C-alpha cells in the first residue's frame, strides 16, 4: 500500500512524500530542506520529483534536491519549469518503478495555464486547483477552464484521497459556511478540522466524497449555492460558470 507523508514547508505548503521502505518520491517540493532532512532521517533514496504547476512555492526546492543526485522531474509540459526532465500532459502515465507506482496525468488548467494533477492508487495530488473545501485562485486561466477542471476531479470516485498543496482548510470552511449555512457536513468538517489543527496535525487528505458534499466550488448545481451566489450578485444566474465565478469573486473579496 502506498504510504503518503506530509512534509510541512514554507508558511502553509505541504510537500507530499510517497514512500516505501527504501525509496521516496516528492510532489511539489517548494523547498529542499524538509525533504533532505526527512530522507536522511528515514534513510530513503529519492526516486522522482513531481510538480503540479510552476509556482515557486511548489518547485523552488527542485534545483537543490537535484544537487544531491539526478532523478526524473515530472511536470506540466505547458509551463516554464527549468528543471523538468519529463514534461507530461493528460494521457501520460508517470511510472515510479522504485515504488511500484503508476499515476495518470490529468490536465486541470485554471489556477495556472497548464496545471496538472496526478491520480492513482486511490490518491489525487491536485496542487492548487482543488483545496479542502476550496479551490485555487484564477491566475492564468478562466472560470470556464476552472469549472471544467474541478468537474473532471469531481468525477473521480468518492473514496479518492485528496492531497492538495496548502493547509487552508479552516479558513475555507468558514467561507463555505457563509455560502451554505445549513450544510451539516460543513459543521462536522469544522469540528474535525479544528480538533486536528489544535493537535498540530494536517487536515489533509480529505476525500472527494466530502468535497462533493461540502466544497462550494464543486456545488454550482446545488440550489442553496445558486441562491447564495444570486444574493451576492444581486442578479439571477444558474449557469455553472456564472455561479462559480460569483462564489470565487465573493471569496476573493472576503
Ligand atoms: Zn500555485
Image (cartoon, rainbow, N blue to C red):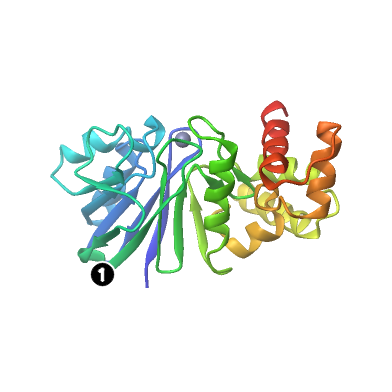
| Residue 205 visible within the image | no
Quarter placement of the C terminus? top right
Query: Residue pushed farthest left?
Result: 69
Q: In this view, does 203 lie above or below 22?
A: above
Q: Which of 24 and 249 is in front in this view?
A: 249
Q: Write the residue at 56% across / 51% down.
A: 150
Query: Residue pushed farthest bottom?
Result: 1
Count of numbered badges drawn on the protein: 1
Q: Is residue 215 above or below residue 140?
A: below
Q: Where is residue 108 in the image (x, y as percent from the top left)?
A: 46, 47
Q: Determine the image quadrant of residue 77.
A: top left
* Direction from residue 73 to residue 179 in the image, left or right: right
| Residue 233 visible within the image | yes
Q: Write the residue at 58% across / 59% down.
A: 154
Other-residue count near label 1 (Cα within 10 Å), few / some / many at <14 / 14–19 / ≥20: few
Q: Disc 1 designates what residue? A: 100
Q: Which of 7 and 118 is in front in this view?
A: 118
Amino acid at each position: 500500500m502506498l504510504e503518503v507523508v506530509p512534509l510541512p514547508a514554507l508558511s502553509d505548503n505541504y510537500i507530499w512524500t510517497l514512500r516505501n521502505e527504501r525509496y521516496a518520491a516528492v510532489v511539489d517540493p517548494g523547498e529542499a530542506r524538509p525533504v533532505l532532512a526527512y530522507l536522511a532521517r528515514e534513510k530513503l533514496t529519492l526516486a522522482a520529483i513531481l510538480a503540479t504547476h510552476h509556482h515557486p512555492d511548489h518547485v523552488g526546492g527542485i534545483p537543490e534536491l537535484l544537487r544531491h543526485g539526478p532523478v526524473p522531474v515530472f511536470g506540466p509540459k505547458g509551463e516554464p519549469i527549468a528543471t523538468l526532465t519529463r514534461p507530461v500532459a493528460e494521457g501520460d502515465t508517470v511510472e515510479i518503478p522504485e515504488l511500484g507506482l503508476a499515476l495518470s496525468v490529468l490536465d486541470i488548467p485554471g489556477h495556472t495555464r497548464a496545471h496538472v494533477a496526478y491520480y492513482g492508487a486511490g490518491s489525487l495530488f491536485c496542487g492548487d486547483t482543488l483545496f479542502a473545501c476550496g479551490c485555487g485562485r484564477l491566475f492564468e486561466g478562466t472560470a470556464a477552464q476552472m469549472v471544467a477542471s474541478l468537474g473532471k476531479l469531481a468525477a473521480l470516485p468518492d473514496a479518492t484521497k485528496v492531497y492538495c498543496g496548502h493547509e487552508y482548510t479552516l479558513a475555507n470552511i468558514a467561507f463555505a459556511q457563509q455560502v451554505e449555512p445549513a450544510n451539516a457536513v460543513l459543521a462536522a468538517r469544522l469540528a474535525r478540522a479544528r480538533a486536528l489543527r489544535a493537535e498540530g496535525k494536517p487536515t489533509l487528505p480529505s476525500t472527494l466524497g466530502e468535497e462533493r458534499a461540502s466544497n462550494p466550488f464543486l456545488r454550482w448545481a446545488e440550489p442553496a449555492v445558486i441562491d447564495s451566489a444570486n444574493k451576492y450578485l444581486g442578479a439571477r444566474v444558474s449557469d455553472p460558470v456564472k455561479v462559480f465565478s460569483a462564489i470565487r469573486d465573493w471569496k476573493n473579496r472576503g
